[in-house]
């Protein structure tokens, strides 16, 4: 999803939100919990 799309949806584009969106978009067939997303962020060196 592009930043323009996020802004049009009324969302503020922040780096943490972009990182989370990248994780979710890279795993389209996996329903991720918040804990799953957090663990993936940690494994990528993001915290």
Image (cartoon, rainbow, N blue to C red):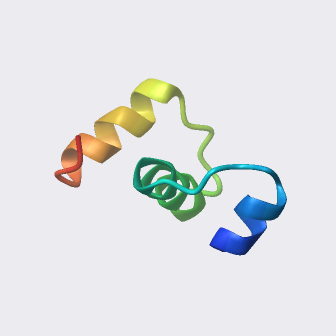
Query: In this image, 4 relative to 25: left or right?
Result: right
Query: In this image, 36 relative to 1: left or right?
Result: left
Disc tally is: 0
Which quadrant is home to the C terminus?
top left
Figure check: 8 above or below 43: below
Relative depth, front residue between 5 and 29:
5
Measuring 55% from the left and 36% from the top, which residue is drawn there? 32
Measuring 23% from the left and 54% from the top, which residue is drawn there? 44
Query: In this image, 28 relative to 45: left or right?
Result: right
Q: Position of residue 7 (x, y in %)?
A: 73, 61
Figure check: 42 above or below 10: above
Relative depth, front residue between 28 and 46:
46
Which quadrant is home to the N terminus?
bottom right
Measuring 23% from the left and 49% from the top, which residue is drawn there? 46
Q: Position of residue 20 (x, y in %)?
A: 48, 49
Measuring 83% from the left and 55% from the top, which residue is drawn there? 9
Query: In this image, 19 relative to 46: left or right?
Result: right
Q: Is residue 1 visible?
A: no
Q: Residue furthest left?
A: 45
Figure check: 33 above or below 27: above
Q: Is residue 11 visible?
A: yes
């Amino acid at each position: 999803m592009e930043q323009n799309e996020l802004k049009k949806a009324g969302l503020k584009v922040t780096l943490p939100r972009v990182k989370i969106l990248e994780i979710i978009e890279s795993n389209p067939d996996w329903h991720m919990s918040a804990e799953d997303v957090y663990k993936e962020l940690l494994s990528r060196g993001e915290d």
